[in-house]
Amino acid sequence: MTTLAGLQGNVLDGYRTPHALYMFVSVTEARVARRWLASRIGRVTTYGSFQAARPASTFNLAFGHDGLLALGVPPIRLAHLEAFRQGMAARADALGDVGPSAPARWELGAGDSHALLVLTAAERESLADAASELRDSLPEGGLTLSHEQHAYSAPEGREHFGFQDGFSQPAVPGASAPRIGEGTLTLWRRWRRLALGEFVLGHRDEGGRVPAAPLGPLGDDATFMVVRKLAQDVGAFRSYVAEAAERLHREPAWVAAKMLGRWQNGSSLARYPQAPGPPASQDPNASRFRYGEDPHGYACPLGAHVRRANPRDSLGYQGRLTQRHRIIRRGMSYGAPLPAGISVDDGVARGLMFVAYQGAIERQFEFIQGQWLGDGNPLRLGDDRDPILAAEGSNGQMIIQGRPPVFLAGIPRFVTTCGGGYYLLPGIAGLRALADGAC
């Protein structure tokens, strides 16, 4: 029987540490790598240990399908996990990873690696010390470092397009007390927490079933981790917003907010359609809204990014069509910010290390990415794609509902996929079994 005691950290409750390092590695010698893993299990930050004491740095590790096979896991224990088995690159077309985002153009070593090691720390020096020690251990541990990416949380939690991010996570049992609106609606229009099985394997999900998991101990206190390295063209975003604002005789902040679905301080258009409200990071009621009260999209456009990513109750049935397609996000930015007032590319690589946890990759991450963001039909938007993540490749347009409506055309690509993969984040029991070759 699974318990949360063995769950790795940063899943149900985020670390909120401002510095991180993602290390993509390959297994070169299975027996040696298992010994290395055995020596590191005691250092893994778990859900319980982080709650008890905040360490100077955290350490977590996840494994791709081929990484588990390389460590000796029998294929039959994973064969039924289709998306995990195939990997992100093989499913690129359904995810919209085509053209500049196609796997053939991904950065070397950044896609579907054997394992992903993640360090975070509150201080940059602590991260550097932990990273140096970890790097030094890899060659003698039967592991090879193939790609490395530093990441950070910007002041006020702003991503490179300038919006506060990271809040409005799904309310789940075992996590910190949620704000109203972060769970799912009941028949009586009250908010409740989502079932634990939506995010942690071995528990029942919103459908009353236990999601498919690796057979054996690898499925205990585990979750599936989706990682995507997303480059952001901040200059193109600023330029497009400025040109649209001039054409529409509107402020750039208004155009950007309508495209995203919230103001730059995180306050939702559903609550504050005319001007920004209190910063979402400081407002306990920031998530207390229903799109069902704005059925025509006059407050928050039907095609706005955050409304597409989580339509809440706007599809009807008290939000039941939404509650099984939620993810927990733990992404961080990488690269230096583009200076204010600059609307051209300066050649600096910058973007988002997108991280999501879920119990079923196909039903959660892939559904959101492929159906709600990459295709307008499920949301009654025709072939209009998400204006932030997936505009180019279709008609690159968006309608801002109103009286009269406003039409945005020629929306270019702002975000390009540079790498990514599907991983299993095992619990402590699974890590021990993996180290012992007992999976």
Image (cartoon, rainbow, N blue to C red):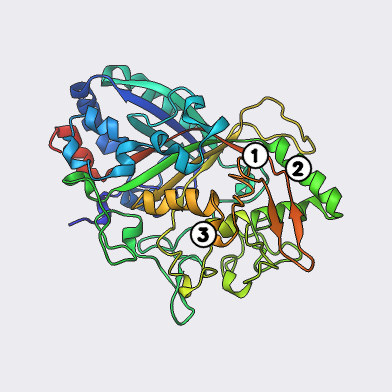
Q: Residues within 10 Å of mark 2 (few under 14, many from 20)?
A: many
Residue 289 in sight from this viewpoint: no
Q: Residues within 10 Å of mark 1 (few under 14, many from 20)?
A: many
Residue 420 screen position, x and y as percent: 44, 35
Query: As rendered, which of 423 and 407 lies closer to the eye?
Result: 407
Marks 2 and 3, how far apart at CA? 27 Å
Q: Which mark is residue 378?
A: 3
Judging from the image, what secondary structure is the residue with disc 2 in?
helix
- For the N terminus, which image quadrant? bottom left
Residue designated by label 1: 414
Q: Earlier in the sequence, mark 1 or mark 3?
A: 3
Q: Residue at x 27, y 43 (%)?
A: 426
User: Is 231 situated left or right of 201 in this image?
Assistant: right
Q: How many marks?
A: 3
User: Is 52 situated left or right of 125 in this image?
Assistant: left
Q: Quadrant of residue 68?
A: top left
Residue designated by label 2: 240
- For the C terminus, which image quadrant? top left
The three-letter amino acid code for the residue at tag 2 is Tyr
Q: Earlier in the sequence, mark 2 or mark 3?
A: 2
Judging from the image, what secondary structure is the residue with disc 1 in?
loop
Query: As rendered, which of 243 and 122 lies closer to the eye?
Result: 243
The three-letter amino acid code for the residue at tag 1 is Phe
The three-letter amino acid code for the residue at tag 3 is Pro
Q: Residue at x 65, y 53 (%)?
A: 260
Q: Are marks 2 and 1 in contact (CB under 8 Å)?
A: yes
